[in-house]
Image (tube, helix red, strand yellow):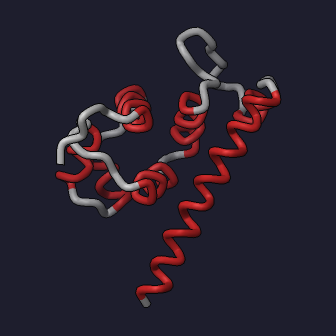
Amino acid sequence: MQVAKEKEHAKIFKKLLQEKKIPQTTLVELSGMHQSKINRFVNGVIDLSAGEFFQLLDLMPPHFQQAYWKRKLGIITPEKVVSEKESLEEAVEKLSPLEQIRIIKTISEKGNLFKQQNQQLANMG
């Protein structure tokens, strides 16, 4: 399955892997996913399901996760750079109320994905 356009989350993830010098073999070891699936995701050939992606992100070190969310939520952009030493909480406090609502919505949606995945697993058993 060919992904027509690499998704934003995949681009951010790939860029962070390169910056933090985390090899694909580490992703395979952490996640248990097959090497070819990781390779195709990182290279933009396929996309992971939301559950797979968030599971993989949750397995990454805290500094990687914080960097991902800062970029995904627009806290760090080429125009707006936040110190890597600044905590995520400090960065969020500097945002406008509307930007903070976007963060809450994103976190809420992530939580719903995990609930859906757990319900599916329960129904299978």
Q: Which residue is situated farthest in the top direction here?
A: 79
Q: Nearer the viewer, residue 43 or 123?
A: 123
Q: Position of residue 12 (x, y in %)?
A: 43, 31
80 on left or right of 44: right
Q: Position of residue 11 (x, y in %)?
A: 38, 31
- Quarter where residue 94 is shown: top right
How many marks are shown on the rendered structure?
Answer: 0
46 on left or right of 66: left
Residue drawn at x 42%, y 52% as measured from the top left: 53
Q: Which residue is situated farthest in the bottom direction here?
A: 125
In the rendered view, would you say 49 is above or below 20?
below
> Considering the image in quadrants, where does the C terminus appear?
bottom left
98 on left or right of 123: right
70 on left or right of 45: right
Residue drawn at x 67%, y 53% as measured from the top left: 108
Q: Position of residue 120 (x, y in %)?
A: 47, 77
- Quarter where residue 65 is shown: top right
Residue drawn at x 26%, y 49% as measured from the top left: 38
Q: Nearer the viewer, residue 3 or 82?
A: 3
In the rendered view, would you say 118 is above or below 59?
below
Q: Position of residue 106 (x, y in %)?
A: 63, 45
Q: Which residue is situated farthest in the front direction here?
A: 4
Residue drawn at x 47%, y 86% as measured from the top left: 123
